[in-house]
Amino acid sequence: MKKIVLFFTLFLLLHLHADTKPLRVAVIGGITMSGLWEEISEAFEKKYGIPTELVVTGPKGVLNAYAQKHPVDFITMHSSDTISNLASSGMIEGLTPWIHNSQMLLSERSNPAKISDTDTIEAALKKIEDTNSTFMIHLSGGTFEVFHGLGNRYDFHPKVVLTQKKHGFLEDVASRKAYTLFGVIPFLMKKHSNPDIKGYLIDAEALHRPYLAATGTIERIGEERHRNARLLLEFLVSQEVQNLIRDFRFKGFPQIPVFFPTRAKWRQP
């Protein structure tokens, strides 16, 4: 009897959404470039019969500029003033944390503090501070947030050098034999690279950064699109998607997790 009810429920859902227009989604670049969003959107359409259309992707500034001029049904980016301001302006609503990515430590190859991937984050930071090694921070809100968190959690106060460079700052890191923070995804994709730079993949929640997702407001996108966008938002925090996030691996790096579930009970297999 339960199987029959389930069958008819799925049939009705597919029938209701047969002529549904694709949801217009704006997704931060790391999630699309990695291939994760493609897997999520396919799973969502398979389950609910609602397609999605990626109308814009890239850094949060690009998403923000697009969303200011065009209605989007769904948007996701790192937790930031950018997405909060979109919500406070009435363009989006229902801010929901659903996934984390991670930053990593980088150094010039001589690695003066002799840190390693087997170190805990606390041990690595202590080595950097004990050797009076330079720690370089580029002007990124996410990097500042993670760095500030490390300082508060581990009493980490190294010799800091700030740089205004966003592109090419790794050359400064290499020339100063310094350490820095950098995103795992752009490092693996060699979005910014330097042959004199080495990365250290240390698993630590203190290095994680949260993403928020939201729907367009019903006044901006209409009742039907709003209802379907809410389904997508709820789907992201379902056990199905959280498990998908936990098991996802970037192509060519089968042993390296690049995203992390937001719910602790689904972090372990």
Image (tube, rainbow, N blue to C red):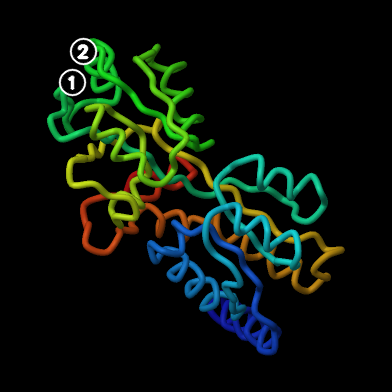
Residue tagged 2: 131
Q: Are marks 2 and 1 in contact (CB under 8 Å)?
A: yes
From the viewer's side, name the closer residue of 50 and 139: 139
Q: Amino acid at mark 2?
A: Thr
- Quadrant hosting residue 116: top left
From the viewer's side, name the closer residue of 236 and 194: 194
At horizontal 33% and vertical 56% (from top left) the residue drawn is 247
Q: Decide which of tag 2 and tag 1 comes sooner along the chain.
A: 1
| Numbered disc 1: secondary structure | loop
In whole angstroms, how far apart are the C-alphas of marks 2 and 1?
6 Å
For residue 133, the mark is none
At horizontal 55% and vertical 77% (from top left) the residue drawn is 45
Residue tagged 1: 113
Residue 225, image x and y in percent? 75, 72
Residue 95, image x and y in percent? 68, 48
In the image: residue 113, left or right of residue 264: left
Residue 3, image x and y in percent? 53, 78
At horizontal 21% and vertical 52% (from top left) the residue drawn is 255
Residue 93, image x and y in percent? 75, 52
Task: For the N terminus, give its image quadrant.
Answer: bottom right
From the viewer's side, name the closer residue of 158 and 6: 158
Q: Amino acid at mark 1?
A: Ala
Mark 2, other Cα within 10 Å: few <14 / some 14–19 / many ≥20: few
| Numbered disc 2: secondary structure | loop
